[in-house]
Image: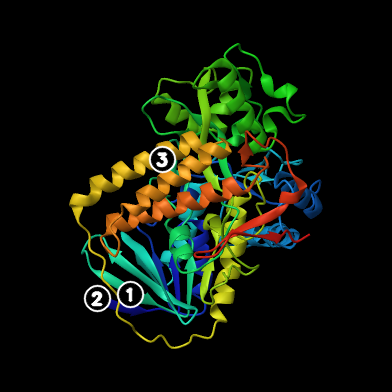
Amino acid sequence: MQIKYFDTIVIGSGLAGLTAAYHASRFGTVAVITKSQLDTSNSYYAQGGIASVMSETDSFDLHIHDTLVAGRGLCDRDAVEILVKEGQARVKELIGMGMEFDKENGRFVLGLEGGHSKRRILHAGGDATGKALTCFMLKKVVEQPSIQSFEYTAAVKLLVDDGYCHGVQAVDFVTGKNIVFTSRATILATGGLSRVYDRSTNPHTATGDGIAMAFEVGAEIADVEFIQFHPSALYVPGQDAFLISEAVRGEGAWLLNPLGERFMKDIHPQAELAPRDVVAFSIYKQLQKHNCDFLHLSLAHLDSEKIKSRFSNIYQKLQEFNLDLSKDLIPIAPAAHYMVGGIRTDLDGETNIPGLFACGEVASTGVMGANRLASNSLLECLVFGKRASEKAHQRNYPEWQSTEILPVNIDVQNENFFLETKNKIAGMMSRNVGIVREKSVLEETICDLEEIDRNIPKGNMEYNYLKVKHVVDTCLLISRAALIREESRGGHIRDDFQKQNPDFKVHIIQQKNKEPRFTEVRR
């Protein structure tokens, strides 16, 4: 078993991980560990853009207000202020480094998305912002001689000894060898978990490994009942959900039910540009009302040439399905898109376990509340990725007393077991813990997940069994929090508790071998 030492370990290669690695490289050696390729992440596929105060008519106060409103009373105010104020500085820093956002007549083109009161969404390449931004940061990371990347290497277990995180055990898919990475600080930037659902906009790697590994060693997990379902993902039977950016509705697209009615006008003053939780739930109710699998998105009333230019990537993708974004009715339905909660951190990205940090979608920094404001996610990666790297550098590294570590092996014969079990769980989660939940169904789901957990061979260090365990633990965290929260708020809607309850204006914290508890929202 190889043992490697770095000053900082970063697990994940989305925008949060790349940002953390880039800034950490100023302080010493950095390892970037990713179970696929460096450019496979939710960040890479983000179409919408990055929210930042960039115009004279906008202000920090307005962006903060919009974030708090979207978060439905569960945002920690201090974290939101850091996000918005430092976010502008991070965006300007990127521009100074050479990142090019779309301009028109020398001025940035600012888009509008759901929940925003002003145009403040920067784009790059029209609808390819995530790709452009991730590739830009990836180039910066690759240029740093102090950063070493480990692709096709899966982190499987965090190494915690005497209450301090000393690194991570990983397995190299190419060689099958185990590698122990040790450091003064370990930064989890493993992304989300939306692939534990049947229908998702996420890459197949987004199965919640970071959440499960952190939970296993005693990290606090917060607010994971809040899963954001993107309202407008392409619906084609037998095909993966393809994200159709909220920016499409920002440019004036309509949502139509099977009768051709524009139903959102009667539901929210912002109509199609209401916050995502409102739009997704409204679509859900229309699907139930009309007993159908999809609704339609229509852009036929807009300038077709502008649409083709502004959303060139979406336009080309839809051509594969013989659909014309500029004139056809586009079949859409909600899909699991973003984990709003995550590993609880302080304002510098550190968890309750010294030496263990989290940033990006895997983290619960306090900025998202019960519902993420559109295009705040890439901003969070920039702000808290940098903060985590700087706090990590300040950590005094207690000497790690090397202990016996059981090696992880990979048995290809168990791959079918993993896939069959994961698909079974994904169907269960979509049916029972989706946009709308209910007590008896949640209780039944928890029992079924616990039964699957009992049937996983205990003490077995085979990789596919560990992956199943991670998925089960992640889904139990979501389901148990959803059962506890007896109200409807943001990305969590209970059929048996259809209103917000002021008694639940709190964060739900879960820790291994401890009873769930509530913590106050920081005002």
x and y percentages locating residue 374 in the rendered image: 63, 43
Residue, far top: 259
Three-letter residue code for mark 2: Met
| Label 3: few (<14), some (14–19) or many (≥20) C-alpha neighbours in 10 Å | many
Whole-Å distance between the Cαs marked 3 and 1? 31 Å
Disc 3: which residue: 426
Residue contact between numbered discs 1 and 2, judged by CB atoms under 8 Å: yes
In the displayed structure, 122 sits above or below 272; it is below
Residue at the (76%, 52%) spot, across then down: 64
Whole-Å distance between the Cαs marked 3 and 2? 34 Å
Name which of mark 3 and mark 2 comes first in the sequence: 2
| Label 2: few (<14), some (14–19) or many (≥20) C-alpha neighbours in 10 Å | few
Disc 1: which residue: 180
Is residue 306 or residue 156 the one in the foreground? 156
Q: Quadrant of the C terminus?
A: bottom right
Is residue 217 or residue 312 the one in the foreground? 217
Residue contact between numbered discs 3 and 2, judged by CB atoms under 8 Å: no
Dot 1 falls on a residue whose secondary structure is strand
In this view of the protein, can residue 501 be seen by the observer? yes
Residue at the (44%, 27%) spot, across then down: 318
Three-letter residue code for mark 3: Ala
Three-letter residue code for mark 1: Val
Dot 3 falls on a residue whose secondary structure is helix
In this view of the protein, can residue 225 be seen by the observer? no
Disc 2: which residue: 1
Dot 2 falls on a residue whose secondary structure is loop
